[in-house]
């Protein structure tokens, strides 16, 4: 007996993730002030981090803050990549 294969449906993104949110003034200084989904906000943060060479040279999981990022990171000088999404979420409304 041959088993029927289920047709693979393309995964649909969660509408909550795709909802455009407005960045705070502090975050807007880094990624711009246009409303964008949370996922795109984190992506733009990574673009900024890589463009400015803020990823730690020894431990690539850490991000060193410059003056603009220190405000977004709540005054911390260094955060891990795992904290990034959580910290960015606090600045989106």
Image (tube, rainbow, N blue to C red):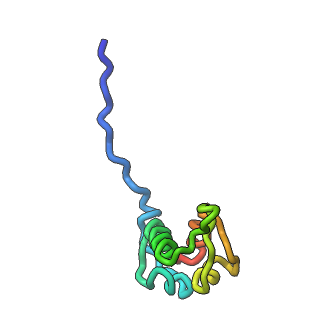
Q: Where is residue 85 drawn, in percent x and y?
A: 57, 66
Quarter location, residue 73? bottom right
Name the residue: 30% across, 23% down. 4
Name the residue: 43% across, 57% down. 14
Instruction: Tell whether 22 sits left or right of 58.
Output: left
Q: Where is residue 72 drawn, in percent x and y?
A: 61, 80
Figure label count: 0
Name the residue: 61% across, 70% down. 63
Q: Where is residue 29 drawn, in percent x and y?
A: 51, 86
Using the image as rendered, state which of residue 54 and residue 35 is in the foreground: 54
As drawn, which residue projects farthest toward the right? 76
Q: Quadrant where the N terminus lies?
A: top left
Instruction: Tell whether 4 sits left or right of 52.
Output: left
Instruction: Tell whether 70 sits left or right of 34.
Output: right
Using the image as rendered, state which of residue 58 and residue 75 is in the foreground: 58
As drawn, which residue projects farthest toward the top? 1
Using the image as rendered, state which of residue 65 and residue 41 is in the foreground: 65
Name the residue: 58% across, 85% down. 68
Q: Is residue 15 above or below residue 78?
A: above
Q: Where is residue 5 drawn, in percent x and y?
A: 31, 27
């Amino acid at each position: 007996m041959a088993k029927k294969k289920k047709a693979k449906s393309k995964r649909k993104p969660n509408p909550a993730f795709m909802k455009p949110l407005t960045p705070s003034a502090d975050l807007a200084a880094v990624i711009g002030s246009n409303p964008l989904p949370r996922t795109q906000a984190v992506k733009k943060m990574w673009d900024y981090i890589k463009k400015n060479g803020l990823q730690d040279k020894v431990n690539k999981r850490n991000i060193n803050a410059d003056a603009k990022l220190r405000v977004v990171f709540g005054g911390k000088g260094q955060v891990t990549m795992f904290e990034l999404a959580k910290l960015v979420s606090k600045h989106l409304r």
